[in-house]
Image: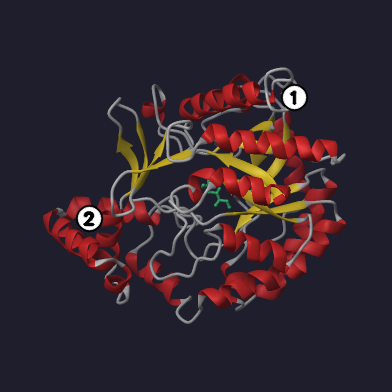
Amino acid sequence: MKQTWRWFGPHDLTSIDDITQAGASGVVSALHHVPTGDIWTPEDIARRHKEIATRKDGSASGLTWDVVESLPVSEDVKKQRGDWRAHIENYKVSLKNLADSGIEIVCYNFMPVLDWTRTDLRWQLANGGSCMRFDMIDFAAFDIHILERPGAPADFTNAVADEAAERFGRMDDETRKHLARNVTMGLPGSTESLSLDDVREHLAGYGAISPEQLRQHFIDFLEEVVPVAAELGMRLCCHPDDPPFSLLGLPRVMSTESDYRLILEAVDSPANGMTLCSGSLGARADNDLPGMMERLGDKVHFLHLRNTLRDDAAGSFHESEHLGGDTDMVALIAAIVREERRRKEAGRTDHQIPMRPDHGQDILDDLKRRAQPGYPTIGRMKGLAELRGVITALEHPITGLAR
Ligand code: DNO
Ligand code: MN
């Protein structure tokens, strides 16, 4: 595995120097300032490569930009409306520009409207740290009573809806606003909360789009871009839905092993692959992560290693420590090591899959610095160090699995 670190660019609270101290040898980054649908230019791409390669004092960092996360797919493409054809053409040009700069792996997702969704961005842990949490009751309270979405009550069990009504009744105005802010933070591009009317407008845009239609739009998109990526020697890898179930009545089509199978088989190419995010997929009890790695491993081009713990009967979960959640991380890493060994034996050049510690808990000085939710320096460094311990043991040439 190649150990990488997500970097949001020069404004990131974690510096390039910090990343080298964390022990990562590669960087995952994106041009967040480019509007979705526009072309990533060679100049912009070159600038980011240079920023990653350079330490504060001007010396070489030794780091390389290995993975793009994300080259976002526009809402127009997902809905096949407006400028969707132009956006697909632009996507191909961006891929070409990235390939020319030496990048082979590109992560993206196909979630309508929302990216990740949580109800609490700084949930207090018993040890004084904090992490992100998704509370099903709070989410239902938001959906039914704050957003007042007409279809919402039918999307929850009676027990959840009743508890949500009761909890909503006890919330003061400030708590309600705070909840709405937390939920809408996952909307792409929103560093501030969106108004409820903005959210309603986004949702209305998907009014008539069924999961089957969204899946067809996804396949149409892949049929266009995958051959281009293959020609350029690139590997596209779709990030799963987070959390892996439908929210706010929106269709979601990348939540389970069978969802992935369908998409990977529909456009069968080494360039059409998967980002295995154990934290996203693991929030669902019926997703078997080590098994998915065993069975789909051939198409896994990028790994997000983090853990979640489902912590009530309603389906809530929080982002637990990297080795301490519902996903058996040691078993998952063992499956990855076996896949890498198979690739090596087959003479494949991509036998070192890039991984990153995806999200971390806020601990120690993270609690004072307030990084982007999920991306504190120290919490992720702890996660990476723990994962590195397991990787080192399982990759060990004498006692590990890599023999
Ligand atoms: C959550 C994160 C996501 C991810 C994007 C990829 O698990 O990894 O925010 O970056 O969805 O497109
Ligand atoms: Mn992820």
Ligand 1: does it lie within 8 Å of the C-beta at label 1? no
Q: Residue at x 79, y 40 (%)?
A: 343
113 lies above or below 283: below
State the image coordinates of residue 148 (x, y, percent, origin top left): 27, 71
- Disc 2 crowd, CA 10 A, few/some/many (<14, 14-19, 20+): some
Numbered disc 1: secondary structure = loop
Q: CA distance from mark 2 to mark 1?
A: 47 Å
2 or 1: tag closer to the N-terminus: 1
State the image coordinates of residue 361 (x, y, percent, origin top left): 42, 32
Residue 352 visible somewhere in the drawing: no
Left or right of residue 91: residue 370: left
State the image coordinates of residue 204 (x, y, percent, origin top left): 43, 76
Ligand 1: does it lie within 8 Å of the C-beta at label 2? no
Q: How is the image coloured?
A: secondary structure
Numbered disc 2: secondary structure = helix
99 lies above or below 365: below
Q: Residue at x 66, y 50 (%)?
A: 295
Q: Amino acid at mark 2?
A: Arg
Q: Which labelled disc corresponds to residue 384?
A: none
Residue 49 visible somewhere in the drawing: yes
The answer to which quarter of the image holds residue 220 is bottom right
Left or right of residue 214: residue 156: left
Q: Amino acid at mark 1?
A: Gly
- Disc 1 crowd, CA 10 A, few/some/many (<14, 14-19, 20+): few
Say which of 321 and 117 sits in front.
321
- Which residue was labeled with disc 1? 62
State the image coordinates of residue 12 (x, y, percent, origin top left): 54, 35
Q: How many marks?
A: 2
For the N terminus, the quadrant is top right
Q: Residue at x 55, y 23 (%)?
A: 385
- Which residue was labeled with disc 2? 176
Say which of 277 and 199 sits in front.
277
